[in-house]
Image (cartoon, rainbow, N blue to C red):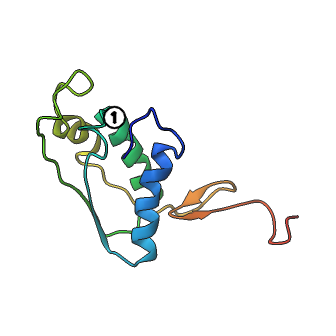
Amino acid sequence: MAAYLDPELTKEKMLENIFAIAYRHKHGCLVLSAFGCGAFKNPPEHVALLFKSLIYQYAGYFKKVYFAFVDDHNTGNQINPDGNFLPFKTILDGLNVHPPTTIRVNGVSGPNRVLNKTSDGK
């Protein structure tokens, strides 16, 4: 994932595309990493929070979501002095989500957006 200096596509949208494409291709589980938190120096706390939001958005769409990390020479800098594992563990460990029972207008569920208008735009 490109660093924040190249914001053409927001980081949240880039990560959401991973979930949407996996769902579209009928994958039951996801294996993710600390996208951009090494060489591109994205803050792991922020990326973990983005993933947390997406896990809630896609609750019920995947059986399991896993994270795999390798802390190498690119981690442990001033952006992520604790490496990538600890911030992700702190934010995501024990997270237990369930599909929503209702969806509000202008809300989202997985790749679906609920709008307050008909297909003819009214």
The residue at 68%/54% (across/down) is 106
Instruction: Please give the residue where the numbered disc 1 appears in the rendered image.
Output: 42
Residue pushed farthest top? 78
Residue 82, image x and y in percent? 16, 28
Residue 30, image x and y in percent? 29, 64
Residue pushed farthest bottom? 26
Q: Quadrant of residue 112?
A: bottom right
In this rendering, does residue 58 appear at all? no
Position of 2 relative to 63 (above/below): above
Query: How many neighbours does mark 1 have within 10 angstroms: few (below 14), some (14-19), or many (20 or more)?
Result: many
Q: Amino acid at mark 1?
A: Asn
The residue at 31%/54% (across/down) is 96
Q: Secondary structure at mark 1?
A: loop
Residue 54, image x and y in percent? 43, 52
The residue at 16%/28% (across/down) is 76
Residue 111, image x and y in percent? 53, 64
Position of 84 relative to 27 (above/below): above
Position of 42 relative to 51 (above/below): above
Position of 7 relative to 65 (above/below): above
In this rendering, does residue 100 appear at all? yes
Between residues 12 and 119, which one lies in front from this camera angle? 12
Q: Quadrant of residue 47?
A: top left
Image quarter hosting the C terminus: bottom right
Q: Is residue 106 left or right of residue 18?
A: right
The residue at 38%/37% (across/down) is 3
All told, the count of numbered labels is: 1
Between residues 101 and 71, which one lies in front from this camera angle? 71
Between residues 27 and 101, which one lies in front from this camera angle? 27
